[in-house]
Image (cartoon, helix red, strand yellow):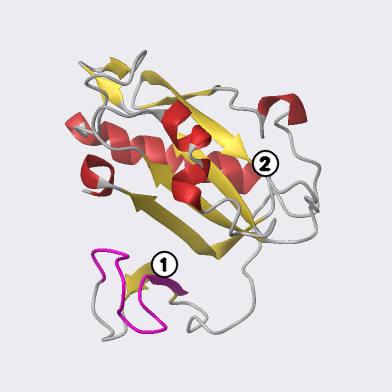
């Protein structure tokens, strides 16, 4: 079980400026948080998502909560299936979409990651369906459908790539951070 903690030891609701060295850090409660990486099921295996489907803005289909959804994936160019990578999910704001997250390099975190992180940009929904345009696209989470999307994406990436399950992060802005 993992929990996000701020420098005061309590729950952290944002990743804004300040907050000390531990602000927003994901801590693996089973290892005390200071142990080494916790490898996912995908470690040691070749990725089962073809390389033609990531690092290029391609929409990867996924089903969650009985709804066809999609996300965009970026994997380090030096990907090594024996190395557990950090994993960041970037949620777009209201009237945004996964394409926007890809174009702005996941809130500009991709160039700062130095090939140490796998990034995903899920696409929101509108009127109970995957968004086809940015206008009106958001995260209403009707019947937990957006949370189930997050769970499905994490499970898929854990299975298909080598990630450190003690270092899974989410970021967003406005409606994408709510």
Q: Secondary structure at mark 1?
A: loop
Q: Earlier in the sequence, mark 1 or mark 2?
A: 1
Residue 2's x, y, as percent?
41, 68
Task: From the viewer's perspective, tell me whether residue 90 is left or right of residue 72.
Answer: left
Residue 22's x, y, as percent?
40, 81
Magenta region, mostly helix, strand or loop?
A: loop
Q: How many marks?
A: 2
Q: Residue at x 31, y 84 (%)?
A: 7
Q: Residue at x 67, y 44 (%)?
A: 75
Nearer to the camera, 147 or 73: 73
Q: Is residue 53 magenta?
A: no
Nearer to the camera, 91 or 147: 91
Which of the 4 image quadrants contains residue 142?
Answer: top left
Camera-side mark, 1 or 2: 2
Q: Which mark is residue 1?
A: 1
Residue 143's x, y, as percent?
19, 31
Within-10-Å neighbours for mark 2: few <14, some 14–19, many 20+: some
87 vs 174: above or below? below
Within-10-Å neighbours for mark 1: few <14, some 14–19, many 20+: few
**Which contiguous range is marked in magenta?**
12-27
What residue did someone put label 2 on? 160
Task: From the viewer's perspective, tell me whether residue 178 is left or right of residue 74.
Answer: left
Labels 1 & 2 near each other (Cβ < 8 A): no
């Amino acid at each position: 079980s993992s929990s996000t903690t701020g420098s005061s030891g309590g729950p952290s609701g944002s990743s804004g400026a300040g907050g000390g060295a531990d602000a927003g850090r994901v801590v693996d409660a089973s290892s005390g948080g200071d142990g080494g990486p916790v490898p996912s099921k995908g470690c040691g295996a070749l990725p089962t998502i073809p390389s033609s489907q990531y690092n290029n803005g391609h929409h990867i289909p996924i089903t969650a909560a009985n709804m066809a959804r999609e996300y965009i994936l970026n994997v380090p160019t030096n990907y090594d299936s024996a190395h557990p990578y950090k994993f960041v999910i970037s949620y777009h704001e209201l009237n945004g979409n996964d394409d926007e997250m890809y174009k702005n390099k996941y809130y500009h975190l991709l160039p700062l990651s130095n090939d140490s992180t796998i990034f995903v940009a899920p696409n929101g929904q509108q009127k109970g369906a995957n968004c086809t345009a940015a206008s009106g696209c958001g995260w209403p989470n009707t019947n937990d459908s957006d949370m189930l999307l997050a769970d499905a994406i994490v499970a898929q990436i854990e299975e298909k790539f080598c990630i450190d399950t003690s270092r899974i992060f989410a970021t967003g802005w406005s409606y994408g951070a709510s």
